[in-house]
Image (cartoon, rainbow, N blue to C red):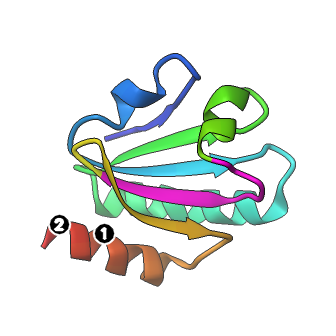
């Protein structure tokens, strides 16, 4: 599944079904840019996982609702329920492990 960019209006719909990895990010954030490359690789490895990116500057209501004070910030969902939350940049192996926990 391709990466989808969320808005304040469609966020809840985007995370409501299946396994979803949400990346709260900022365009000028260097760790966010590094994580974006990792997520691009994961997109190819896990085509059945939805990746949703939330620009905190363009989606202030959603960022406030989730109390996003630092970025990057990852949320792992399954069928609309948050299973894990990670603040800060993490590597691809760590994310793969969390996705494996959810899937298997």
Left or right of residue 29: residue 98: left
Query: What is the x, y in percent for residue 58?
Result: 73, 26
- The image shows residue 4 at horizontal and vertical percentages of 47, 33
Q: Quadrant of residue 80?
A: top left
- The reply to whether callout 1 and callout 2 are in contact (CB within 8 Å) is yes
Between 73 and 35, which is closer to the camera in this rendering? 73
Q: What residue does disc 2 label?
A: 103
Q: Is residue 29 above or below residue 13?
A: below
Q: Quadrant of the N terminus?
A: top left
List the single residue furthest toward the right: 28
Q: Secondary structure at mark 2?
A: helix
Q: Give the vertical position of 82 relative to 98 (above or below).
A: above
Closer to the camera in the image, 86 or 67: 67
Decide whether residue 42 is among the magenta residues. no
Q: Please give left or right for residue 6 compared with residue 19 in the image.
A: right
Residue 55 visible from this viewpoint: no
- Mark linked to residue 33: none
**Image x and y of residue 54, in percent:** 60, 38
Instruction: Return the residue nearer the eye: 50 or 79.
Output: 79
Image quadrant for the C terminus? bottom left
* Residue linked to disc 1: 99
Q: Quadrant of residue 62?
A: top right
Q: Residue shown at 63%/64% (left/top)?
A: 35
> How far separated are the C-alphas under marks 1 and 2?
6 Å
**Percent of width and height locating residue 8:** 58, 22
Dot 2 crowding, Cα within 10 Å, few <14, some 14–19, many 20+: few
For the record, the magenta segment spans 67-77
């Amino acid at each position: 599944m391709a990466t989808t960019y969320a808005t304040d209006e469609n966020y809840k719909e985007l995370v409501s079904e299946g396994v979803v990895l949400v990346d709260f990010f900022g365009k000028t954030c260097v760790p966010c840019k590094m994580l974006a490359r990792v997520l691009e690789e994961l997109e190819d490895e896990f085509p059945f996982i939805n990746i949703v990116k939330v620009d905190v500057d363009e989606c202030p209501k959603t960022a406030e609702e989730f109390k996003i004070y630092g970025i990057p910030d990852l949320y792992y969902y399954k069928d609309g329920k948050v299973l894990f939350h990670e603040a800060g940049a993490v590597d691809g192996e760590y994310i793969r492990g969390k996705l494996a926990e959810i899937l298997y």
